[in-house]
Image (cartoon, rainbow, N blue to C red):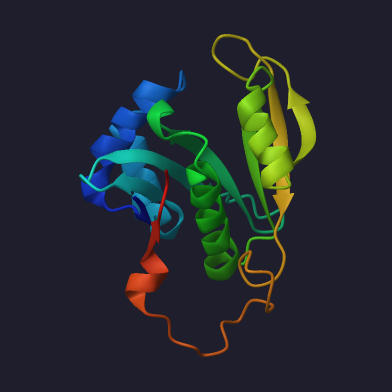
Amino acid sequence: MVCIRMATVDDLLQMQTTNLWCLPENYQMKYYFYHLLSWPQLLWIAEDFNGKIVGYVLAKMEEDESQPPHGHITSLAVLRTHRKRGIATMLMQRSQQEMRSVFNAQYVSLHVRKSNRAAFHLYTKTLAYEIHDVEKGYYADGEDAYDMRCHLVGGGGGGGEDGGGGGEEEDLVTKNMEMVTVS
């Protein structure tokens, strides 16, 4: 069983460790702190029954006022031992839902290596991202990146209402934590 929940400051070191195990693009701890302090609603982790973080999404809101409000996925990682179980999809959907409901984001952007076929499949087939552009030499090793976007609709990806929340109070445990069975 894996728990998907909002990240806290206590999770940042394990998030960084997960990043180091999974991805060639790595960040200093201050970058994780910056995200958590600026957009705490957008950082989500997947935690196993022992409390070990097995995946995370690190996201932010772009601050370019010449563009409509939109989010950006900075990093998504799931340990190899926990892949192919829908964890990345759940992390992405949760962060996107908060982008829409909290920040009124119109779309979400991300970059993905052209060679990363598994991630490309996740983004295009499962999460409905589309290629917006190709950024030549985007990565430190010179590899090109797809600049991808997913347009958000309704009230935070739930496919329902248009934004406002309607005055319903949500149970914080339900809002901030989801239990997921993975086999």
Quadrant containing the C terminus in the rendered view: top left
Residue 66's place in the image compared with 32, above or below, is: below
The image quarter in which residue 107 lies: bottom right
Quarter assignment of residue 140: top right
* Outermost residue toward the top in this view: 141
Q: Which residue is rendered at x = 60% and y = 81% of the image? A: 164
Tell me which residue sits at (70%, 59%) in the image: 152
Closer to the camera in the image, 86 or 160: 86
Is 38 located above or below residue 124 in the figure? below
The answer to whether residue 26 is seen in the rendering is no
Provide residue 6's location: percent of width, then percent of height: 36, 57
Q: Position of residue 171 (x, y in %)?
A: 37, 79
Q: Residue furthest front?
A: 183
Would residue 91 appear left or right of 121 to someone viewing this image? left
Q: Judge whether 90 appears above or below 161 on screen.
A: above
Give the vertical position of 124 relative to 117 (above or below). Answer: below
Image coordinates of residue 89 in percent, x first then y, are 56, 47
Expressed as whole percent of the image width and height from the top left, the position of residue 59 reads: 49, 46
Residue 81 appears left or right of 109: left
Q: Is 100 situated left or right of 50 in this image?
A: right
Q: Could you say which is closer to the camera, residue 153 or residue 70?
A: 153
